Amino acid sequence: MRFKEFITQSVHSQEKGNEQIFHGFLENSMVGQVVVFASGSMLANQAFCHMVGYTEEELATKHWRELNHPEDLPSSQLDVDQMLRGEKPSARTVKRYLRKDGSCFWAELYTTVYHEPAEWAPYFLSTIIDISLRVQYETELETMKKMLVTFLDASEDKIILKDENFRYLVVNQAVAKEYGKEKNEIQGRSDFDFLDNVISGQFRSADKEALRENKIIRSEERIGEKIYETRKFPVPLHEERVGVGTFVRDITEDVNQRELLRKMSETNRIVTECMIKPFQSAEEQMEYALHEAQHLTESEYGYIYLYDEEKQEFTPKIWTNTVDDDCAMTKPRGAYPLHTAGLGGEVIRTRRPIVIQDYQNSEIQTKGLPFGHLTIQSYLSIPLFENDKIVAVIGFANKKTPYTEHDVTAISVLMNGVWIAIKKKEKEKETELLLERNQAMIENHDAVMLLLEPESGRIVSANPAAMQFYGYSKEELLKLNMTDINTLGKDIAEDLRHRALLRRQRRFTSPHRLKSGEVRMVDVYSCPIPYNGKTMLYSIIFDVTQREEATKQIHYLAYHDYLTEIYNRRFFDESFHSMARTGEFYPLGVIMGDMNGLKLYNDTFGHAKGDKAIIALVERMKQSMPADAQLARIGGDEFAMILPRTNEQEIRAYLDLLEQRLDSLNIPTEGTDVSISFGYGLQRKPEDGLDSLLKEAEAFMYNRKYYSNRSSRSSAVHVIMETLFTKSEREKYHSERVSQISEAIAKSMKLDKEMVNKIRVAGLLHDIGKIGIEESILNKPGKLDTKEWEIMKLHCAKGAKILGNTLEFHDIADWVLAHHERYDGNGYPNKRLGEKIPIAARIIAVADSYDAMTHERPYQKAMTSEEAIVELQNCAGGQLDPAVVQLFLEQVLVLHPLKFL
């Protein structure tokens, strides 16, 4: 059935007169008309077919749900269900329809359920209006509204829109923050709801003026300590309604800056006037400055008192005319003490500017004022200092507005500038008198004196001593410029004259060339003086050539070692901190060296030869240094080196290379090898300091030092050996042989140099734990009984404990502890098995066993080498490591059969 046929049949069931109207309204309607049956099938007019892009025949095959956007289906189904249940006869819905091409559009839907005629009942008739453009417009409008709100809220200015009744329509976040409320709490209310009546009245008056004048009204408003720039303007609303828009900006800082610039500009003008005007006296100069400052601060009264800090006395000097007019006191003209000064003395007591905005309600008001004193409302006072002493006090009173920090700044700058100007004029007059008085003395003085033109450096005058020093006649000197004499160059010479002219630098040292061509270092003392109406530079010159040479030598000695002439500890520390501070040389490495046996060398051959040995060692180290390294002597027998931009691998490689080169360059003197042991420290973090690096280097150095061949006579090793060997000389020779055998085995195993050295020392100290065992047990001629054997077995643990408590030997303690462990796990003290025993302990065990068998003991005779070899082979895999036994027999004993007997 087509939509037209449905309409026709439906109309036939109605009155005949309605058929044409009903048909035209539905079939030819510009809006969509759809009939939906209980089965879900549809009949639609041409307008709806055009909306969805289907033909009427295609729509007839669709279920109504297929055309609904999935998100809108639940609400549509609910409307259908409610109408079918009779809960409502019709429904109005806004939802999305799907077009044939997959796109969608928004529509407003009006649906009514019908129950006649019965053969189609129930069915629905829907009128559908495409509102996509309206939805798009509303969406864009909402987006624009959000953008506008975001834009307004981003402004620090306060933005307000009020309606024609001056109630808030729109406010931004700055307004809400100012009022401490949410924006929706402000909207619809007026200023009187948030502000006091006075300020609200001012705002209301300005709002009315903007509407009345129908233009932008600009104003500045002060609220408390804040100053705001406000712009108000009419804003058309709706239906001829006009509201008021407002922009409010905090311009307190801008106004303060403008005021400061204005006052500083005026200050500069007044100071300049004081500098250049031909005042007859200092009093006239001060009076001019005081009245100008009174106008600058907009004060009613002003005064200047001189002050003697030693006597603590005031002397009234200058006051404004208004003081004479209004003060009924008999004004004192003489000095009076500080304790009677009242308000005027507060600035002396505090030694800083004071500001009182409300004198009547201030604490100082309780001190009172003398009878007849002029009335004080507000007050500003500033001290003037000269050489850290207060020399004068400036005071102002009764400004209509509060005194500000800018008033304090401007008056401080002004009056200090004026005081300097006064003192400058006084000095100029004094200088003129001095020049006239001392001209004869200058002519006859032995010191070199020149008078120079500051701008050009031309020599204007010279005394006889100058002619004698430089070798020129007076006529020749007066034709010269200082650039002809000063060898620093034109630009530097001009800068020095400029600094002297401004009194920024009075003394400087520079090289001067004499007529003979010789260059001498001179100290120049120069200052500006008035001369014939101009400012000239008066210079006194002293020959300091010998002093400068001595200074260079002193500076050299301050940073160099007197003996070796390399850097000293002071330079080393300062150089490290300077390089670390810049961060350009990170990471910094520090190598520290300690000479071996220097004291023994000095004791044997004398300190003179010891010094030569130190110098020779330094020369060898210098030959092996990287180009960017810095070498310093930081103690009698201690040296250190800074290596910039290095790493762990590089510094260790360099350390090994340095020791190899020193060994190759070393030439024994008087039969004694004076050598050096090294350690290093490296920055792991930029903040690692010199102390921590030196400690790290020192620990590393001593660790290497005690395992190094060159330091085998270390006092620490010597003391440990002697402590045991005084009890038993047999133990001494046994330990030395075990040390040699252990070293030979370690070398045959191709272990690294440091490991070989450690094993050699461990072999020497393997029985150090016997120190605590009584001599009667150590030297017993027969076999030990059970109790004595248990005591003897403790020497491993005792030895490990002794070595573990030392910095130098703690890492070989475990080897000494384990040298009586058995490869089969039946040894002591911990019954370790196989390779769980350290390789060093397994090596020492073989060396110990072989030496014990081949040398006589109190309780047994010595075996032959052949017998000992058989016994070692029998013990391999049981007591001893078979691999170590095999290597000892095949590589060590075969190559050196007699060495270990």
Image (cartoon, grey):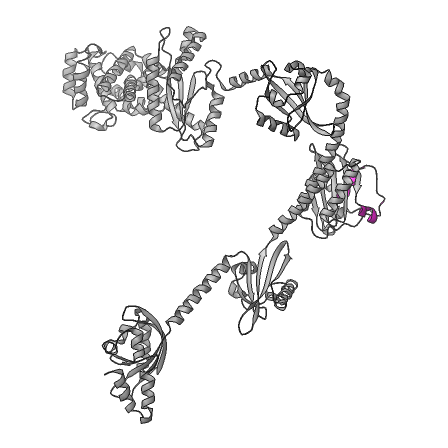
**In this rendering, would 649 be left or right of 338?**
left
**Residue positioned 59% across, 68% down in the render:** 166
Q: Quadrant of the C terminus?
A: top left
Q: What is the quadrant of residue 343 in the picture? A: top right
Residue 471 painted magenta: no
Residue 340 painted magenta: yes
**In this rendering, would 439 be left or right of 506?**
right
Q: Position of residue 96 (x, y in %)?
A: 33, 71
Mark count: 0
Q: Position of residue 588 (x, y in %)?
A: 41, 28
Out of 360 and 245, give the one closest to the viewer: 245
Out of 538 and 457, give the one closest to the viewer: 457
Q: Quadrant of the N terminus?
A: bottom left
- The answer to whether residue 451 is above or below residue 289 is above
Q: Residue furthest right?
A: 330
Determine if residue 432 is in view.
Answer: yes
Where are the magenta residues, as a range?
320-343
Q: Position of residue 44 (x, y in %)?
A: 28, 80
Q: Position of residue 785 (x, y in %)?
A: 23, 18
Out of 209 and 898, give the one closest to the viewer: 209
